[in-house]
């Protein structure tokens, strides 16, 4: 049985992706920040699909220590087939400047670095399965460039710009993974505008009000979840990098710049204190 790990899997897109992928007969390991919400999500999925294989692991992925702890737990749960897919969906929005326990700007750490570090820790198991890395992106990456002079936006924080940059970073990471090797295929999913609470959970004031109004015009999470299920199920692995509605779509021209991607990859290794892919079975 193929195993798929999904972060941010207790609500919204992540939960619906877990439902859709479990319904295909795959084993799902979900990750969430709250133990209570993890248990609730697991119960809901198993109530609807009693024969499904669903497990949850709790951890705050904005904290690299907890990213490593979650990785250790998941590695202990894997069998000889390895990990078929890592779906890095956990993310958030902050309309004020905040930092994580590691001292990094929260959106950059949670929306991007967590997925980078998870992919590193689980890389041997993804390689073993000839698996896939699937990131949650956003069309907003097309209107952004890396803010190299101040990647963490310490001096002039902008909620929207920090969010856009975190999504561009995910695109560059996936593109660089595909340039470097062929054993594991990397994708980014643009879920489009979705009716979820992501923009209202950790925000306030006008940002929270704007998101609540705007998100009401979005699709339901189960619609966007189908693209994740598609990328997990298709054999052979589909061509393309960036998908929306189960079809490849165009990216920003900046995503094709190997120099930006290499620079980000090196910076990410430094910020995580790793050499990517260095861990072996």
Image: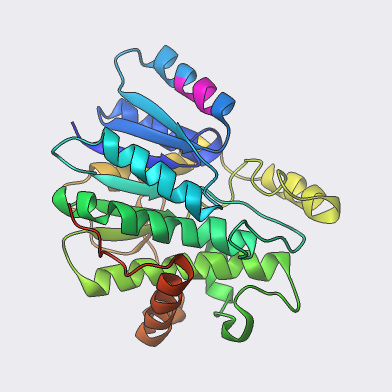
| Above or below for 108 versus 37 | below
Colouring style = rainbow
Q: What residue sits 38% from the left and 87% below the top?
A: 259
| Residue stretch rendered in magenta on the structure | 38-42
Residue occupying the far right of the picture:
205
Q: What residue sits 55% from the left and 60% below the top?
A: 109
Specify whether residue 189 is in view. no
Magenta-colored segment: predominant secondary structure: helix
The quarter of the displayed image where residue 150 is located: bottom right
| Above or below for 127 versus 177 | above
**Count of numbered circles on the image:** 0
Q: Is residue 263 left or right of residue 80?
A: right
Q: What residue sits 21% from the left and 36% below the top?
A: 2
Q: What residue sits 71% from the left and 64% below the top?
A: 159
Q: Position of residue 191 (x, y in %)?
A: 49, 51
Which residue occupies the foreground of this view, 124 or 140?
Answer: 124
Of the 4 image quadrants, the one containing the N terminus is: top left
Which residue occupies the foreground of this view, 197 or 274?
Answer: 274
Q: Where is residue 242 in the image (x, y as percent from the top left)?
A: 38, 62
Q: Position of residue 69 (x, y in %)?
A: 42, 44
Q: Is residue 173 left or right of residue 148?
A: left
Q: Position of residue 225 (x, y in %)?
A: 43, 40
Q: Is-magenta flag for residue 39? A: yes
Specify whether residue 11 is in view. yes
The quarter of the displayed image where residue 270 is located: bottom left
Q: Is-magenta flag for residue 243? A: no
Q: In this view, does 261 lie to the left or right of 184?
A: right
């Amino acid at each position: 049985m193929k195993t798929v790990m999904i972060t941010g899997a207790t609500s919204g897109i992540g939960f619906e992706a877990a439902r859709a992928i479990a319904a295909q007969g795959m084993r799902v390991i979900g990750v969430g920040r709250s133990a209570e919400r993890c248990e609730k999500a697991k119960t809901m999925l198993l109530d609807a699909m009693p024969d499904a294989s669903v497990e949850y692991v709790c951890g705050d992925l904005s904290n690299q220590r907890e990213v490593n702890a979650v990785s250790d737990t998941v590695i202990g749960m894997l069998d000889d087939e390895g990990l078929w897919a890592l779906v890095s969906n956990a993310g958030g929005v902050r309309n004020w400047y905040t930092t994580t326990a590691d001292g990094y700007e929260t959106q950059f750490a949670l929306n991007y670095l967590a997925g980078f570090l998870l992919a590193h820790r689980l890389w041997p198991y993804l390689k073993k399965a000839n698996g896939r890395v699937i990131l949650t992106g956003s069309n907003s990456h097309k209107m952004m460039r890396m803010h190299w002079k101040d990647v963490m936006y310490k001096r002039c924080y902008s909620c929207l710009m920090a969010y856009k940059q975190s999504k561009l970073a995910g695109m560059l990471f996936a593109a660089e993974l595909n340039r470097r090797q062929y054993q594991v295929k990397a994708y980014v999913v643009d879920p489009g505008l979705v009716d979820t609470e992501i923009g209202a959970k950790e925000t306030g004031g006008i940002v929270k009000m704007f998101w609540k109004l705007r998100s009401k015009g979005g699709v339901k999470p189960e619609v966007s979840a189908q693209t994740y299920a598609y990328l997990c199920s298709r054999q052979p692995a589909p061509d393309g990098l960036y998908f929306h509605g189960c079809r490849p779509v165009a990216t920003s021209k900046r995503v094709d710049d190997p120099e930006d991607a290499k620079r980000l990859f090196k910076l990410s290794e430094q910020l995580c204190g790793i050499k990517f892919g260095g861990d072996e079975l």
